[in-house]
Amino acid sequence: MQNSFPTTTDKKLFKKCYAYTRADDVKAEGIYPWFRPIQESEGPVVHMEGRPIVMAGSNNYLGLTAHPSVKEASIKALEKYGTSCSGSRYLTGTIDLHEELERRLAKFVGKESALLFSTGYMTGQGVIQPLVGRGDYILSDKDNHASIVSGNLMARGGMNTNIIRYKHCDMGDLERRLKQIPAEAGKLIVTDGVFSTFGNIADLGQISKLAQEYDAQIIVDDAHAFGVIGEGGRGTASKFGLKDEVDLIVCTFSKTLASIGGFVAGEERVINYLKHHSPALIFSASPTPASVASALAALDIVEAQPELVTKLASNANKVRKGLIDLGFNVIPGETAIVPVIIGDDHQAFHLWKGLFDAGIFVNVFIAPATPPGKAMMRNSFMASHNDEHLDFVIDTYAKVGKKLGIID
Ligand SMILES: Cc1ncc(COP(=O)(O)O)c(C=O)c1O
């Protein structure tokens, strides 16, 4: 029987899809590093292709996805409330656990109120657009996460808001831009607290000074800062002692909080406004009972065991130092992210393959996630890695790096 599917040439818009072969070419070489399925996970060790692999690329920063009490809370919630809330928070999708988690998160980060979203990405999208309008200005760091970029674009498309992307962490550029904006215009400075690719920390001290001087509000995305920096893992504002100066903290559950979802925390009046004006909240189903319960149980652990935050820092620092001592081009830092610049895409793919074959999984980032010619291994560590895991990572980098001529 002849099939009736159209031939590939029939669809004008899809021509680029049919012509796209870059991923297939890398796959054919056996060095394709993405979309690799995990068959089982204990946190620091996962099973892939039927064998144990040390995970050195996860955002499960405090290792809580495998914690027995987090898993148990998730199962109990599933049994009590079912698998889904089947509606948005606005209508039938609010359960008591959403409100409990909002109260707990607000208290933890030192804000009056908080609001949950279904993912961190939706939080970034859902918070920016309702707060700005025609004639307002968003000043956004060039390296901000895609969720912020998407929120900015929605603000520009829907509200005709002016978007200014200032040079990455360049406070001189930010000030220059602020100076050019009419004094009476509304201004919103948005920055990642810890930048997700290179793991560097925003200069919140300077951002806050400029915000005061030029009458701007501040949003900080703490996805990679929550549970990682600040007092007991309270994030970037806490690290800089600027809890009150940062107007809104947006964050995800998909890293330290061992779940899926996101939240924004700030003044009660602002959160109340967002609650009634954010399309990402109003027109999308709420986070599932199991994911809210696991985030709550993870938060219990973050509060009760601040030593996990210290352990995470010492684990990441151990590997950072080990790789620097070996001669790798490591971007210095103090967060859980340890980026190793390789340069050439192919060299990075080969290093990835060598590490994977030896039993380690790390992430490869290439342009446009990095500047062109700056392909890198994005290593990230967990509080639950032990010395044996970390030594294995350092020793394997040494062996594979030497074999490929990346280090001497
Ligand atoms: C800085 C930053 N913001 C937001 C997000 C989105 O979070 P989620 O995975 O919950 O959508 C991420 C996740 O990669 C992130 O790195």
Image (spheres, grey):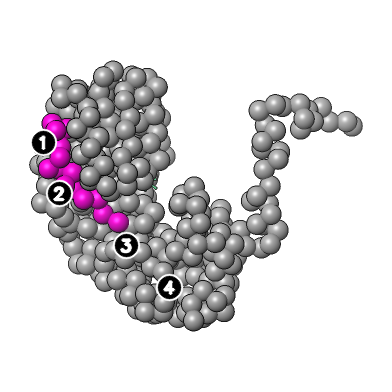
Q: Residue at x 89, y 32 (%)?
A: 1
Q: At which x and y percent is residue 171?
A: 22, 46
Q: Is residue 332 above or below residue 394?
A: above
Inspect the image, locate mark 1, and give the three-letter code of the amino acid beneath it: Glu
Q: At which x and y percent is residue 287?
A: 35, 38
Which residue is most to the right? 1
View quadrant of ligand 1? top left
The residue segment tinted magenta is: 200-216
Q: Residue at x 29, y 71 (%)?
A: 317
For marks 4 and 1, the one nearer the N-term is 1
Out of 153 and 288, give the one closest to the viewer.
153
Left or right? Give the position of 20 relative to 143: right
**What residue would you read off at disc 4?**
328
Judge whether residue 142 can be spotted in this image.
Answer: yes
**What residue would you read off at disc 3?**
336
**What residue would you read off at disc 1?**
213
Q: Residue 262 magenta-drawn? A: no
Q: Is residue 221 above or below residue 201?
A: above
CA distance separating discs 4 and 1: 41 Å
CA distance separating discs 3 and 4: 17 Å
